[in-house]
Image (cartoon, coloured by chain):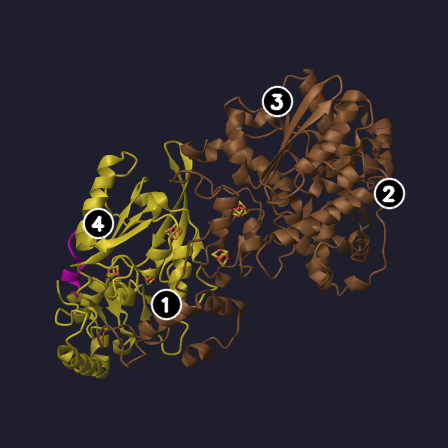
Chain colours: A brown, B yellow
Amino acid sequence: MSEREEREIDGSRRSFLKKTLGTCLTVGAATAATGCSDGNVSGGEGWLPEQYNIPGNYPVQVRGRIPIDRGNPSITRDDRKCILCGQCAEVCEKSEAVLFNYELPLKDDIPCIHCGQCTLWCPTAAITERDEKESVLHALENENLHVVVQTAPSTRVGLGEEFGLTIGINVESRQVAALKALGFDSVLDTNFAADLTIMEEANELVKRVVGQIKAPLPQFTSCCPGWVKFCEYFYPDLLENLSSAKSPMQMQGALIKTYYAKERNLDPQKIVSVAIMPCTAKKFEAARHEFNSSAYITGYENIRDVDYVLTTRELARLIKIKNIDFNNLPSASYDPLMSEYSGAGAIFGVTGGVMEAAVRTGYYMLTEQRPPDALFNLTPVRGLQGVKEAVLQIPNVGELRVAVVTGMANSREVLKRVRNGDAPWHFIEFMACYGGCISGGGQPRSALPPSDAVRAARINSLYTADEKSVKRLSHENDEILEMYKIYLGEPGGELAHKLLHTHYIDRSMHLTAKKALA
Amino acid sequence: MSKGVLVDLTKCIGCGSCYVACKLYNENKWSDKAPVNGKAAKLADENWTVVKEYNISRDNCNALRFVKKQCFHCEHPSCASACFTSALRKTEEGVIVYRSNLCVGCRYCMVACPFEIPKFEWGKAFPVVTKCMMCYFRVINNEKPSCVSVCPTQVMQYGDRDELLVEAKLRIDSNSAYIKHIYGENEAGGTNWLYLSDVPFAQLGFKTDISDKPAAAYTSRYMSLTPILGAAWGLVLTGIYFINKYRKKNAAEKQMKANDSEGGNNA
Ligand code: SF4
Ligand code: SF4
Ligand code: SF4
Ligand code: SF4
Ligand code: SF4
């Protein structure tokens, strides 16, 4: 083995992993391959091509990996770092139900829902998000531009890990301080739009339940772009079930270049809208061509609602590049107008969180009463199980049945029942990433593979934020109520529809879904 | 009995596991100049195999296809016929191997190969010719070549060429989606790597003007026509010296796997 070790003296992570992954097997194989046990070249002296006469460091347990389209807006791969461990393929197939869930040959696309779970599982970080921090730095340097940033509910409980802090620690105010230090002109909170999403989505649910709008039940949540694309690929017949409400990021983005620009007297064309997300699929979402409502409203054709999405990891890199001493930053607070949030908005990043937030406000909308205490700690939809269910009694309305699904592989059974018409639920929350956005594909990578302990720590941190909030109901958010009053009108109203709602695209022609899975 | 690989292009998802396996197994460096994937993928001295992307039209729909390229391992390898030092030669398993210390750098093989497979290490001080050697060490140990073993969708099947041909015929007969042609069955007199596809091979960058006659029959021409031969006589002698040396050694070697006596001149 001494020769082998010498050859790997570069100590790269790849060779280290190659060595540790298949140590025992490799030793045997290397010995056999080199024939060094008896000093002879095995396989006939003389005609063995000489590169086989030297000890190889080929990992013995090689497994195939996921394909990545070179044009994938969310993820990319450095082949040089790949050790063919097959982890990416495993998570994509087993947990996200994408890889091998379609028949071959391919059609015109390499199916991917951009969830980025593969970036978390890849042990060598060969797979990463498509890095856009340079573009953001560029925008920040341009003094003519007003660069607005929004931060998702989950990044605040992940970012600290990049700076050696306790897993799950909530670094909300330090994150704001870091963004200000980086030069963003305004720091807004996506939690605000999470509350807004609830206003629109709960309103839609109530209308579906009482039959005011003709759309099927159960209603599906639509805030996870990975799930939305999954549904578009594999369940185009159920797109009507998807809530037409945009995701919080896209609502916030649409409002930044309209409402915010108006209130702040800014030229929408000079605003650059950046989003810090725990998610790689958000890069894909921001690039969906239909997400330019602000262009539609303002008449400036070329503007986009969200210009750049950075993952939590990219933000950490930005902070490090700029030598900002994150751990010693003084706390700072979000800029007003679009940053207030309730505890309900705070838990959007957790599996079951959107559901819990929605039923709190849905209850209020149906009964005009404050929801009972049980809805402030809706234990049946909390936790890391793949599928969770709850039945709520709504006075004068009856039962409201809800389900929560995390990890797309867990969605198949539920969706099968919806397809067959034997689904008892009124409302189902889907999140592509197991555990919710707190373990999204853009969150920090710990030294170990993604684990439930890490997920639970981040989840608890968000539930604590909810508990500590004075307001825990989306419909009590004053900035939101004010915005409806002076700008949007009614939830589900005309302008709200133009800015905050969307439509979906049947993508089933891009793949042949496996019949057995339907 | 020739070993071969049946490549069913309809199953390829373009993941590139095969070229990574090839790089790792053969310890070839990554090249900045020659991409291993995408539309510009090209074989190079360090890329023994690449996966090239094609956007084509099939039944009036856009289709994305990938083609894994490497040496075809010809039944009658013109590269080996052209090589007068027998640096390139065919083993009894049908693998075309290459031994760099016999190579004099004449590059006749590169001219002779109908598929433009052998590449020259232009960037090196002491350049040699390189190409896929079908993971020869694995082959003689009854293992699949690295690229074959790692493919997640089993695009490639490794086995005896005769059996692979039977399997290939079965597949194209039982599924109308396939083009009714096994690329490599007759091309250049037959190759050990065989391809199936559901779009015309011409659209996937396969040469369709390749004669069914083994090109090796003509290759003596390359040698007699070249004036370099005279100038390089010294090198040739060196080559012959090596050949003889290895022939003697090999003759004594009972366990010898490669078929030495056939050399490259088995046309
Ligand atoms: S981003 Fe998600 S869907 Fe795409 S390859 Fe990675 S794991 Fe699979
Ligand atoms: S997880 Fe990373 S290292 Fe492992 S096969 Fe996939 S890309 Fe390669
Ligand atoms: S002639 Fe070309 S394709 Fe055939 S064995 Fe030689 S290098 Fe390979
Ligand atoms: S057979 Fe071996 S040398 Fe040839 S392309 Fe495959 S991995 Fe590379
Ligand atoms: S490993 Fe298989 S599926 Fe992947 S590119 Fe190579 S041949 Fe295609």
Parent chain of label 3: A
Residue contact at pointers 3 and 2, CB within 8 angstroms: no
| Residue of label 3 | A217
Task: Check disc 3 and give the amino acid type.
Answer: Leu
Whether residue B121 can be seen here: no
Please rate how many residues cluster around mark 1, counting C-alpha atoms within 10 Å: few if below 14, some from 14 to 19, many from 20: many
Q: CA distance from mark 3 to mark 1?
A: 57 Å
SS of the residue at dot 1?
helix
User: Is residue A104 shown above or below A312?
Assistant: above
Q: Which residues are magenta?
A: B210-219
Identify the chain of the residue marked 1, using the numbered disc in the image: B
Pick the front one: A165 or A243: A165
Give x and y (percent) for residue A348: 71, 40
Residue A23 percent across, percent down from the top left? 44, 69
Secondary structure of residue under mark 3: loop
Q: Which residue is mark 2?
A: A336
**Do the residues marked 2 and 4 share a common chain?**
no
Ligand 4 lies under 8 Å from the Cβ of mark 1? yes
Q: Are marks 1 and 4 on the same chain?
A: yes
Foreground label between 3 and 2: 3
Give the distance between the C-alpha atoms of the residues marked 1 and 4, in whole angstroms: 25 Å
Q: Main secondary structure of the magenta part?
A: loop
Chain letter behind tag 2: A
* Towards the viewer: A425 or B107: A425
Please tell me whether residue B36 is drawn above or below residue A477 in the rendered image: below
Instruction: Give the residue pinned by disc 1.
Output: B26
Q: Residue at x 79, y 29 (%)?
A: A372
CA gap, disc 2 to disc 4? 70 Å
